Image (cartoon, grey):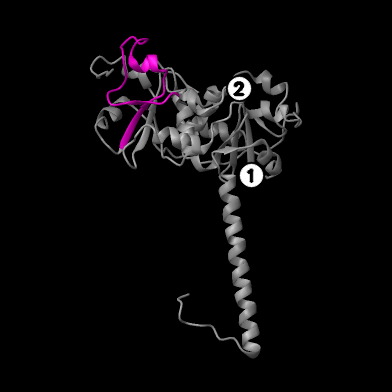
Amino acid sequence: MKSGYPIVLSGLNGRISTVLLSVIFFTILDCQASAETTDVSRKVIVTCQWLEDNISDPDLVVLHISAIKRQYENGHIPGSRFLWPGWISVSDENESTIPADMKEIEKTLERLGVGEDSHIVLAGNGGNLVVVSRVYVTLCHYGLGDRVSILQGGSDEWNSSGRTLSVEQPVYKKGKLALKKMDYLVDAEWMTRILSNQSFCIIDVRPKASFDGSSSTRQGHIPGAKNLQATELYDSKSWHFVSEEKIKELFVGLEMPEKARPVFYCNTGNSASINFVAAMIAGYDPILYDGSMEDWSSRSDLPVGN
C-alpha cells in the first residue's frame, strides 16, 4: 500500500475492516511460516536433532547408505531403508564411476518408497562421506536436488548422541517417481569447450602433489584449474562439513570470476563430490566432471598444465 493514503476506520465498518486486516495480516504470517518450514526441510544438510523432530513425517524417506547390508541389519535409524551405493553408481570399461541408468535408479528409489512428494535424507555409515556425497550428486543429476539432504554425522552420530538404533525392517508402500536429467555431470568434450570460459571456474580437489604433477602419470592438472582440496571442507573425525561461512571463505580465496559456476574434478569423480555438496551448501550451482583425471589424463590429445 502506498504511503499518503491513510485508512479511515469508523463505526461498524471500521471494526469489520480492522478484523479483515487482522485476518489478512495473520494469514500472511502463517504463509511465511509455512514457507520457512518448507525451506528448512529442503536444506542440503540436516542434523540429527532435525531428523528426530521430523522422523514421523510421512513424506520423509531416510536411506541408510553402506557398502554391506549387514551393517544396516546390525542397527539403523528407525524406519530407514537400505540403499546400496552400487544401485546408484556403477563402472564401465572407460570410467571407474558413472551414474547408473536413470530408469534403473528410478525403479530402485520407487522400490524404497520414494515418491513425488518425498524428502530423502541420506544417512551415511562408518564415515563414508565421499560415498554419500556421490549419491547426492547423482540424485541431483537426475532432478532430485531440492528434495535430498545429507544427515550430518550419519547414523554413527545418531547412535553416539544417545538415539536408538533399530534392527527392524520398516514397512512402506512402493513409490511413484519420474526422474529428469539435469546435467550436473559433464564429460571431457564439455570440459574442452569451457576451458577459457569465464562463466565457469575449474577446480581440482586433489592433494597439492597431484595438482602440481609430482604424483601423476601425466603430470599436472587441467589447464586453468584452481586447487581446493576436498579434505578442507569437512572434519575427518566428526564427518561434518565445515560451516557455510568457512566454505564461502574458501571459495572466495580461489578468486573465482564473478558469478562463475564451479566445475569440480578429482581422480575418479568421487572425492570431488564433497566439494560439490559444499558448494551447494554455500549457495553455488556446481558441476562435476565425472571422468575427472582418470579420463582426462588417458587422452593424449588433451592438454595438462602444471
Q: Amino acid at mark 1?
A: Asp
Q: Could you say which disc has been placed on residue 252 in the image?
A: none
Residue 176's image quarter? top right
> Which SS class for mark 2?
loop
Residue under label 1, please give it: 59
Q: Which residues are magenta?
A: 200-229
Residue 212's image quarter? top left
Mark with earlier residue (2, 1):
1
Verify whether residue 135 appears in magenta: no
Q: Could you say which disc has been placed on residue 237 in the image?
A: 2
Label 1 near label 2: C-beta < 8 Å?
no
Location of residue 179 with respect to 228 vertically, above or below: below
- Residue 49 pos. (x, y %): 68, 39
Verify whether residue 216 appears in magenta: yes
Q: Main secondary structure of the magenta part?
A: loop
Residue 303's image quarter? top left
Q: Amino acid at mark 2?
A: Lys
Question: Gap in Å between the C-alphas at discs 2 and 1?
Answer: 31 Å
Q: Nearer the viewer, mark 2 or mark 1?
A: 2
- Residue 174 pos. (x, y %): 63, 38
In this rendering, position of residue 147 left or right of residue 295: right
Residue at position x 40%, y 21% from top? 266
Residue at position x 35%, y 11% from top? 216
In this rendering, position of residue 272 left or right of residue 193: right
Residue 289 visible, this angle: no
Residue 176 visible, this angle: yes
Q: Nearer the viewer, residue 178 or 252?
A: 252
Location of residue 127 with respect to 22 vertically, above or below: above
- Residue 250 pos. (x, y %): 43, 32
